[in-house]
Amino acid sequence: MDQENKTTPIIGIVMGSKSDWPVMQAAAAILDEFGVPYEAKVVSAHRTPDLLFSYAATARQRGLSAIIAGAGGAAHLPGMLAAKTTVPVLGVPVPSKYMKGMDSLLSIVQMPKGIPVATFAIGEAGAANAALFAISMLSAGHPGYIASAAEQLATYRQQQQEMVMEMSL
Ligand code: RP5
């Protein structure tokens, strides 16, 4: 990102409700750790459909290279965003009160052919992995990130390896 403005968001984190934020913060924490500029916003597919449309329709021109979208229950947010933009959408199923997020997962993952959403695990692990995946993708497209993000990802993996190697029962 040598020639890019280092504060202009290149990743959007959106979620259906403020109640999703404790889960979606796991994505924000990874982006903070890697120094990737992002924005975070509540955009509801069902409660604010017009906002959803305008967010998706303007995403590319505003410079977003990926959208991480979390939602629970009848989780239409990632799919509807993907319907309105060709910016890659990474869906995070948020645990729901009665079905523990299985409903969210199935709502997000079962997209019809032609409108893809990359779907991650239910909950915080999915949110964190969506951010790591977005960083991996962007490290190829944003030249300045290649050296730093690829290196940081390698270090991140190395730390996990060391953590496991140190586990004793
Ligand atoms: C979805 O409904 C949100 O993504 C959230 O996971 C779920 C419940 O929302 P609240 O009733 O907590 O606002 O739209």
Image: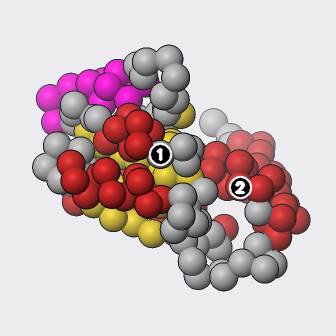
Q: What residue is drawn where x is 21% and y is 25%?
A: 99
Q: Nearer the viewer, mark 1 or mark 2?
A: 1
Q: For the residue carrying disc 1, how many other residues have a C-alpha within 10 Å: few (<14), some (14-19), or many (20+)?
A: some
Residue where numbered disc 2 is placed = 138
Residue 29, relative to residue 74: is it above or below? below
Kind of residue at badge 2? Leu
Answer yes or no: is residue 66 visible: yes
Q: What residue is drawn where x is 33% and y is 57%?
A: 54
Q: Chief secondary structure of the magenta span?
A: helix
- Left or right relative to 123: residue 89: right
- Left or right relative to 136: residue 85: left
Residue 135, relative to residue 129: is it above or below? below
Marks 1 and 2, the one that precedes in the sequence: 1
Percent from the top left, x then y, of residue 64? 55, 61
Question: Could you tell me if the residues under marks 1 and 2 are in contact, i.e. CB atoms within 8 Å?
Answer: no
Residue 58, relative to residue 158: is it above or below? below
Residue where numbered disc 1 is placed = 85
- Left or right relative to 134: residue 119: left
- The residues colored magenta run 97-109
Is 32 within the magenta?
Answer: no
Q: What residue is drawn where x is 42% and y is 22%?
A: 111
Find numbered disc 1 in the image and state the secondary structure of the residue it sits on.
Answer: loop
Quadrant showing the N terminus: bottom right
Q: For the residue carrying disc 2, how many other residues have a C-alpha within 10 Å: few (<14), some (14-19), or many (20+)?
A: many
Kind of residue at badge 1? Thr
Is 105 within the magenta?
Answer: yes
Number of residue marks: 2
